[in-house]
Structures are given as structure tokens and as C-alpha cells.
Amino acid sequence: ALASRTGAARARPTRVRAQRFAGLELLFDLIFVFCVAQLTRIYREDPSWAVAGTAVLLFIPVWWAWVGISFAADRFPADDAIARGLVIGAAGATGVMGLAIPSVPGSGEVPFALGYAAVRFIVALYYLHVRATAPDGGHLARFYAAGFGAVGAAWLVSAVLPPTPRLVIWEIGRASCR
């Protein structure tokens, strides 16, 4: 889960607050699993190379949605109402991605892109929220916020483009996450 990987949970002042945030981590983990289940379902229904390729390409943003919020919460742990709200928002946006997966390619492309754009923007907001508590004065958090925001903007733009340019933007966004 989010805080347990770096020992950040031990840094939280009270056990109750840590447990409350751990519940949000589990919620996000369950939504990630839902997305993976959706991906396996589309492949199970049509086990072709084309569907396998689509599933892999969709898995990458799903993975980065989960990694993005997980890494942010591990690197800059915060357990206040705003941080919890942002994690809930990221979980909801990832859920939108999961609901759209069965309709990609097709009508699910725009909701998937909007869900991922929202996750990226929410993670950027998380970094901006925690920058004041960062040991380096927030420089690294601002750097991460700019990167997440830029990729979120690219995915947002892709939602209004026709399918072929949309997929080009998705590929550029995917390549920028390396």
C-alpha cells in the first residue's frame, strides 16, 4: 500500500490517522485491481494479438495512475482532509478509467483519457499541497507537479482529438512516463 513501502506510516503522528489513510490506500488498490480485471476480461473475451496489444497499452496508464499517487503519498506523506480528498479523487478518476476499458477502442476512449488526465492533475495538486512540508522547501514537489500537470494536459487535449491523433498523443504520453 501507499505508505507502508517507505516507512512513511511510522512518521504519522497518531495511529488512528494512519489507519484512516491506510483505508484509502486499500480503496485505491481495489480500484487498481478492478482496472486490471477489466483488462483481463477484454482479453478473455477475445484472446487475439490485437486485443492483447490494446490491453497492454491501456495497462500502462492504469499502472502509472496507481504508481503516481502511491509514490506521491510515500515520498511526501500527508494525512489531512485535503490529502485524503485528493486520494479519493484519484481513486474515482481511476475508477472511470476502469469503467471505460471495455469500450476502448471506441466510445470508451474519451472517458478513459479524461479519467487519466484527472488522475495526473490530482497527483500534481497533491504535490503542490505537500510542497510546504517537503524537506527541500518544495522544489522536488513543484518539479513533480509540473511533470504530472504537463502529461495530464496532453491527455486532456487527446480527449478532444479524433481517434488517430488521440492515439499518437497517448503514445507520446506513455513514452514520457519512462
Image: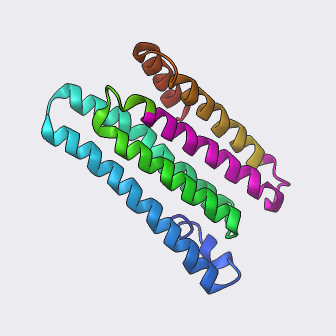
**Magenta highlight: main SS:** helix
| Residue 52 horizontal/vertical position (percent) | 23, 33
Number of numbered discs present? 0
Location of residue 163 (image quadrant): top left
Going by the picture, which residue comes out furthest to the bottom?
A: 15
- The colour scheme used here is rainbow
Point 72% across, 37% down: residue? 146
Q: Is residue 49 above or below residue 77?
A: above
| Residue 104 horizontal/vertical position (percent) | 32, 31
Q: Does residue 26 appear left or right of residue 69 in this picture?
A: left
Location of residue 84 (image quadrant): bottom right
Q: Does residue 36 appear left or right of residue 157 in this picture?
A: left
| Residue 157 horizontal/vertical position (percent) | 57, 24
Point 30% across, 33% down: residue? 103
Q: Is residue 94 above or below residue 8?
A: above
Please state the extent of the stretch shown in magenta in the rendering: 111-139
Going by the picture, which residue comes out furthest to the right?
A: 137
| Residue 150 horizontal/vertical position (percent) | 66, 31
Point 67% across, 84% down: residue? 14
Magenta-colored stretch includes residue 113:
yes
Residue nearest the observer in this picture, 80 or 54 = 80
Magenta-colored stretch includes residue 169:
no
Q: Does residue 92 appear left or right of residue 83 in this picture?
A: left
